Amino acid sequence: MSAASPAPQQPVRGGLLERLMATVRPRFRQEVFRPDRDDTVFVRGECRLAHCPNMVGHPVRGLCDSHYQKWLQAPDRDDWDNWLAREDEWLRLRVSPPQCRVSGCCRSTAQHGLCQRHSRQWDTRGRPALEDWLTQVVHTPTERGERDCQFPGCPCWCASAGVRYCQHHQVRWKLAGCPEPAQWYADVARADAERQVPHVKLARLGRQVRLEVQYGLQCRHDERVKRTPMLQVTTAVKHIVDAGVTSLLDLDEPGWRRVFGAGRRIPCGQRDYTSISLRFVLDTRMRLQQLLIAEDPWADQYPRDTWDLRLLGIPVGQPRWMHFSAIPQPWLKDTVKRWCRWRMSRKLSTGTVVRNAIGIAAFAGYLDARAAPADLTRERIEAWLATGPLRDHIGTLSVFLLDAHRHDWVPGLPANAFVFHDDGPPPRSPKPRFISEYLMRQLEDEANLALLEPNEARLVTRILIGCGLRLKDARRLAFDCVVRDDTGAPYLAWVNHKIRERAAFFPISGTLADHITTQQQQVLQRFPDGCRWLFPARKVNLDGSRPLPDISYRDYLTRWLGRIRLVDAHGRPATVTPHQFRHTLATRLINADVPQHVVQQLLDHMSREMTAIYARLHDKTLRRHWENAAKVNTDGQAAIIPADHPLADAAWMRQSLIRAKVTLPNGYCGAPVQTDCEYANPCLDCRFMVTTVDFLDQHRRHRDETARLICEAERSGLARIAERNRRTLDKLDAIINALQTAAPGQILTGGVVEDLHAAS
């Protein structure tokens, strides 16, 4: 069954106009829609020209629409900086009326750059060369003095003693019909503000379709997710008028795509981008359908052979359609619809339910179109199994029959109509898809990582490599995803969306924690009021409600792999997938002798079988010895992690990430396998030092040897060596004393004594 768009569904349109009249607010029910200047859905900010008051709707080079068109027609458009400076200076001079060129005169100009008074004087002199005359003339005040123009903000003088405005505003006032000054000032200010904000004219549309477009604008405003430039809405209005429709529901989606033209869909990467104007029409059409069936969406969709899942509230990013037309038996089709609706109500993955419908359709295609429930016998099922159906389809039919029996959905269904767990072929042995170390050296090279853009994609990659998260879990990390235990060690708090959204923790390095802090600062710069996600989507995300889309990261990764020219050991171009980083980390941990059950907890696998893909079970001797041991830290301190502490399991995993060879002469190294050791032997000052009573004799021998070295150093006058060994002696004394008095079930790790039973 194809996931393509089905035959057009004709919605019931009765009462749509009445619903729109009751829903569209007066603010949007205007023939000319002008958004507020600070409405981020429709307005992007101010024109980059400092003296331009216009707001920007669809910023191209940061210019308003009028200046963008002016720049396109400018002969010096290639000299961008010079054009900006010249245009801004011209705007600066236009902010206030131009003043008379005579020195000291502040009247506005009338002609030839002169006010009326000085223009008459120049005429009286016979109009000599203007520049020469300007050097000779001197402004002299009138007998009554000069009065300022009464228009708000005007710096010029009145044109004459008998008027209240300068020449410029006196002419504008007369053209306006000599209105009351206060009302005129308000009208001028309102008209200026309207001209400065992008707007869309809807008068050309019919009554209902105009109300539908207004409803679409209202929805975009209320949702505050997608930017909607007025220029693009104007383009949409033009196409609606050209289509000659009375309602957006007159055409289905393919019909509207034809109206806008096939060239509107531009291939880019793995996706086809749709023009903003077409997307506005399609989104509005969807909102109208939802408005019509708002009381009970299931009552509208359930009888159909194809369900539009958007109308059932399934968000974008999940499957759009669910098909039942390939099931010819009416009783089976009705039962499958009921089953799918029930499974969706249990919040199962939409993709899973869609695949369930496909699997049952495959089985229905095997049955006779006239088959009745009584024909669905075990013998018929075995005959179908003999045809070699897909293993997923076998599993789907097994679950369907079990649910049908349990809920008694199909009267007359034979009691032996079951598919058992061993009816299908055995599953193939899964193979780890780890990335070779030859490729990983290229991928982990800092110079190559620096080429991965944008910054959030680089951090996602670091997390995938270092923590082995699934991509859907990494891109949905919460903003505050770093927590610390009692020792200050950082952990990545994440949610396993594959296993019922289970919370999990992974120990991380301080460097990775710092990278996450930097990303948090960048997110706060973009969303000062806060954001739910560490990696918010870059587009269609005005309110920060959407996380980084899966396909966006895959695009970033694909472009990066081409940029660094990833090649295998034979020099051939190579590629990797995000999930392979998870396999690679698991393989590295197993190869470093990390116990399999620890790897299972680190990666939050559902079962040991999942972890067993990477290695066979390892000996549990180490874990058993630790469970029976007392532990103290290198300072001889005692501390216990409570069993209900949220980091108890994560703390045990951090302790269990031991290096290859496991033991040191007097303890264990608890450093994670990804961490380089920065300390020298004997590790007493290392934060990863772990020791138990099993090494008490070694500590005592080490103490005796250290005391002997101190005596020899003092006799030889080597004070520095003696002092260094005294610190070691103090450490050993504290460890020995603590181990001698420690309670059962404690071990020392990372500078703190923690209770193993509580931590595990």
Image (cartoon, grey):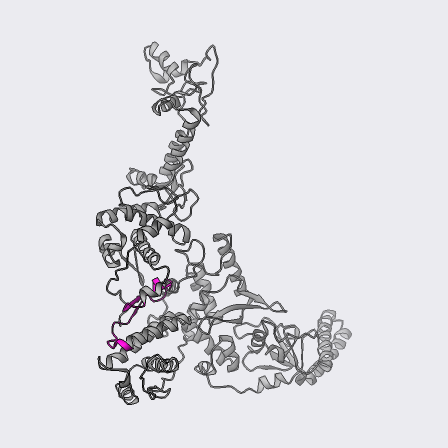
Q: Residue 92 or 172: which is nearer the viewer?
A: 172
Q: Residue 244 or 707: which is nearer the viewer?
A: 244
User: Dividing the image into 4 quarters, which one contains the C terminus?
Assistant: bottom right
Q: How many marks?
A: 0
Residue 566 percent location from the top left of the image: 37, 68
Q: Quadrant of residue 710?
A: bottom right
Q: Is residue 315 located in the magenta-colored stretch of the structure?
A: yes
- Look at the image and give the residue range highlighted in magenta: 302-331
User: Dividing the image into 4 quarters, which one contains the N terminus?
Assistant: bottom left
Q: Is residue 752 left or right of residue 103?
A: right
Q: Is residue 58 left or right of residue 759?
A: left
Residue 162 percent location from the top left of the image: 42, 14
Q: Residue at x 41, y 32 (%)?
A: 189
Q: Residue 679 or 211: which is nearer the viewer?
A: 211
Residue 72 percent location from the top left of the image: 29, 41
Q: Residue 187 or 148: which is nearer the viewer?
A: 187
Q: Is residue 544 left or right of residue 689?
A: left
Q: Quadrant of residue 419?
A: bottom left
Single out the residue that lies furthest toward the right: 715
Q: Residue at x 62, y 78 (%)?
A: 758
Single out the residue that lies furthest toward the bottom: 379
Residue 129 percent location from the top left of the image: 33, 15
Q: Is residue 75 located in the magenta-colored stretch of the structure?
A: no
Q: Is residue 529 visible?
A: yes
What is the magenta segment's predominant secondary structure? Answer: loop
Q: Is residue 562 visible?
A: no
Q: Residue at x 45, y 56 (%)?
A: 544
* 523 shown above or below 324: above
Q: Residue at x 37, y 74 (%)?
A: 569
